[in-house]
Image: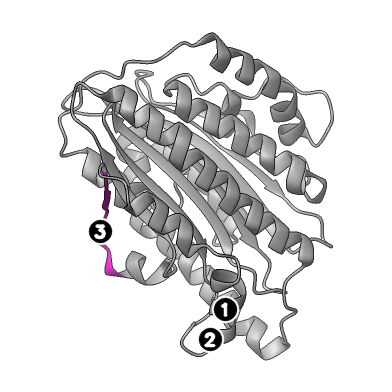
Amino acid sequence: MGLLAMSLVSRACYFVPLPPLRFQTKSSSRRVLKAALRSSEKMRSGGRAAPESKLMEFPHLTAAHRDLMVDLIQGVENGVGEHLLPSTVPPDVEYYENQSGTSQGTLLIRSALQSSPIDFMIASWLHLKQPQGGAFNITNIAGYLKPSNDIPHFQFELVQCNPTFLIFFLDLLPRTDIVLRPDYLVTYYEETGLEKHRQRLAALLEVSPYFSSSLYFRKVISSTGILVSVKCEESKSERVEEIVREEIGPISKEVMRIWMELCMNGGRQIEEDERSLMEKRDLMIKKKAIEMDLSKTMPLQFGEEVANRVLQVIRSAFKTA
């Protein structure tokens, strides 16, 4: 579920003509997917035997997009899986669809152990039918931290609008006012070298900055955050696949690795007065994500009953219920 950026980035897709997606079915992609199913079951159940998770099926994605999601979820399991508890998302929220079956979604939420700096992790995909025809696909992985530390939140989102147009959002979301905390900028953004990844993508001819219409959203992301559109000529869908595989994929995996390493180191411990302010800031961002994003788009796509069921689980995880 694109909990911070779904409506902001997907709004652009609504105004682009959408030819049907041409899905690739390379045998290598199928092998990667099958090899990751055990890990997906482990991610869902905390190591216990479990039914195959809908999260890992990715039925509507292109090959490169699907492979990237498999790699990222495997990376979570390898990097911080021991921190995470089994998912408690009910089956009718783990996978849901609208009445006609034209739009589907998945949701996986895993809280962390009390001793972990991580609060919870969330992963999802959405396949959303568009009124004028066609559909677009959103995949999301996010990690939220506890107020006992100041490690940035992790956010990955990739929106496939059509075979030659996608929107990509990747960031470590700051949890404090960087003007007041220049050391925060140094520790989490300069010393980690995040800026070189933003510049790497910006250098590609097919990549352009994506400017959200929400001034609030622009304020939330970091100065090294990646928010771009990738657009190729209609006859060059293979070039989009190449960019996902050769550029977006390696960058996403490296930023995730950096974030998980920060988590393993535990971050800076927060004093009580600063903790209260950070809790308030984190909560405000989560509330805004739901208000600006899901509470408006979910009922339109899935109907009130399904939307309320999914939103209740999300609000509970976000502690905004």
Q: Which mark is residue 236?
A: none
| Residue ID for mark 1 | 186
Would you identify the image quadrant in which residue 52 lies?
top right
CA distance separating discs 1 and 3: 25 Å
Which residues are drawn in magenta?
207-215
Disc 2 residue type (three-letter): Pro
Seen at 18% across and 25% down, the residue is: 234
| Residue ID for mark 2 | 182
**For the residues bearing labels 1 and 2, Cβ distance under 8 angstroms:** yes
Disc 3 residue type (three-letter): Phe
Residue 235 placement, left or right of 226: left
Give the class, few, some or many, for how many residues have Cα within 10 Å of label 1's Cα (few <14, many ≥20).
few
Tell me if residue 256 comes above or below residue 87 in the rendering. below
**For the residues bearing labels 1 and 3, Cβ distance under 8 angstroms:** no
| Residue ID for mark 3 | 211
Viewer-nearest of labels 1 and 3?
A: 1
